[in-house]
Amino acid sequence: MVDGRPLSIQRRPGTEPLVIAHRGASVAAPPNTLAAFAAAADAGADLVELDVLGSLRVGHSEAEVTAEAPSLDEALALLAQLGLGAHVDMKVQGIERAVVAALARNGLLERALISTTWTPSLRRLAHAAPDLPRAIGYPRDRLSVSRFSWPRPITRGGAALLRSVMPVRLPALAAYAKADILALHHTLVSRAAVEAAHRRRIAVFVWTVNDPDEARRFDAFGVDAIVTDDPAGIRAAIREQLLLHR
């Protein structure tokens, strides 16, 4: 866990990538709930990724918000209490200053990053809170496609074509968005893309990875963080690989 320490998004040689609990430890509790966030702490996650809507409620979409859905302040207060970092994924534009204010109220500005797929939002954040790490998500996951298994022919063919252009395309996207981090769907991550980003001092986060073998592969590529529904399992897989190479 980050456990009160300032967040470092750049991975140092010989260290593990950050493990980010996707909407909390979603294998243990319903996603985007306080129970899932508490489970992430028990699982040893470094940060919790949570989705925030225009209402400043936590949820992937307004249609999925229930009466039990916490407010952003409720979620951040719990993360601060648990010593976890916050990865706030903004699902709409126009709430940038409100999110920064909520992080400040809960003492999490030094242990947080903000992500979105909207480049204008990140450019506004770069002006409003220049020291707060900013991640551009790619591609835009409007329908929660990361939850489902894509057909293999589509995944292999389409993703292979996209991966081939990522080392050139993505650093340019990050520069335009004024992003410090590229948050990429796992089908688009290659060693070449990671190295191209790192040459420009841009971190690479990969989402959503629940398979231990895939996690070890991305760890070997040098990604800076792995976003997962199963932080305990992925942490164990990474540490196993680290021990084998010592």
Image: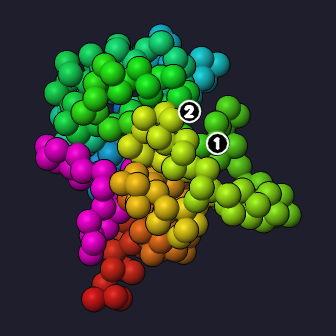
Mark 1 highlights which residue? 139
- Confirm whether residue 171 shows in the render: yes
Q: Nearer the viewer, residue 73 or 223?
A: 223
Indicate the secondary structure of the residue bearing disc 2.
loop
Residue 78 in the image: state x and y as whole percent: 26, 31
Q: If the image is split into quadrants, where does the C terminus sit? A: bottom left
At x 47%, y 23%, the residue is: 121
Residue at far left of view: 4
The quadrant in which residue 187 appears is bottom right
Circles 1 and 2, Cβ within 8 Å, touching? The answer is yes
Q: Is residue 127 above or below residue 41?
A: above
Q: What range is drawn magenta here?
A: 1-27
- Amino acid at dot 2: Thr
Q: Nearer the viewer, residue 154 or 197?
A: 197
Task: Pick whichever of labels 1 and 2 is earlier in the sequence.
Answer: 2
Q: Callout 1: 10 Å neighbours few (<14), some, many (20+)?
A: few
Mark 2 highlights which residue? 117
Q: Nearer the viewer, residue 33 or 209?
A: 209
- Amino acid at dot 1: Pro
91 left or right of 106?
right
At x 44%, y 25%, the residue is: 123
Indicate the secondary structure of the residue bearing disc 1.
loop
Q: Callout 2: 10 Å neighbours few (<14), some, many (20+)?
A: many
Residue 10 is one of the magenta-drawn residues: yes
Residue 100 in the image: state x and y as whole percent: 30, 21
